[in-house]
Image (tube, grey):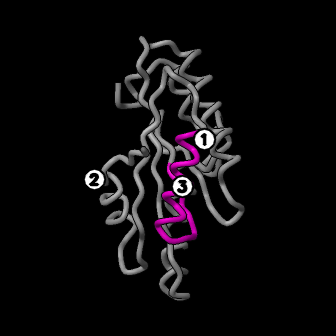
Amino acid sequence: MHFISEMNSEQQMMFSHDGLRDSLTYLAAPPYFYESLRRELASAERNKTRLALIRFQLLPNIPENESLYEAAILAFAELLKGATRSEDLCARLGRFEFTMIVSAQIDIAGAIAERVQRSWSETNFLCQAHVVSASGKESPLEILNRLDGAPALTWP
């Protein structure tokens, strides 16, 4: 299932938002995230500062079970809230997809991603992380496309 229209009402509720916050996790919703990304890119270009994006994907390795899925999503959102600095933004962009805008160089973003992955102890859901640096000269779409193609991070 990839489209909201194909989901039952309980599954659709897991994706609802008010434009600012995801109703399940209270992380930023997609519209707010995309607008924030546009603003942060403009600010980074003006101020000559660094910006990085981290995408986390939870990959379930259990049969579909909505209550377990929801519990994992909530637990991961809480983990991200604890790992997010005040100047960063974390959003839930898909059912099992979370993306952070990090006001830092890529090595700092990589350290945050590693810390989150190492802290995630739920064995029924693999956590993948992808990190890219962003420049103000790229559009949000270009950066997100690069993030889609970035290799998953692996830690020794």
Q: Residue at x 59, y 23 (%)?
A: 70
Q: The N terminus lies in which quarter of the figure?
A: top left
What x and y, as percent, mark residue 22? 62, 41
- Labels 1 & 3 near each other (Cβ < 8 A): no
What x and y, as percent, mark residue 89? 61, 58
- For residue 141, which quarter of the picture? bottom left
Residue, far left: 149
Q: Mark 2: which amino acid?
A: Gly
Q: Nearer the viewer, mark 2 or mark 1?
A: 2
Residue numbers of the magenta segment:
99-118
On residue 149, the disc is: 2
Q: Relative to residue 114, is residue 60 depicted above or below?
A: above
Residue 38 appears in the figure: no
Q: The C terminus lies in which quarter of the figure?
A: top left
Q: Residue at x 31, y 60 (%)?
A: 146
Q: CA distance from mark 2 to mark 1?
A: 27 Å
Name the residue beneath numbered marker 1.
Answer: 17
- Within 10 Å of disc 2 (Cα), the crowding (few <14, some 14-19, many 20+) is few
Q: Mark 1: which amino acid?
A: His
Q: Residue at x 53, y 16 (%)?
A: 66
Q: CA distance from mark 3 to mark 2?
A: 16 Å
Q: Tag 2's secondary structure?
A: helix
Q: Nearer the viewer, mark 1 or mark 3?
A: 3
Q: CA distance from mark 1 to mark 3?
A: 18 Å
On residue 1, the disc is: none
Q: Tag 3's secondary structure?
A: strand
Q: Tag 1's secondary structure?
A: loop
On residue 100, the disc is: 3
- Within 10 Å of disc 3 (Cα), the crowding (few <14, some 14-19, many 20+) is many
First-in-chain label (2 vs 1): 1
What x and y, as percent, mark residue 100? 54, 55
Residue 52 appears in the figure: yes
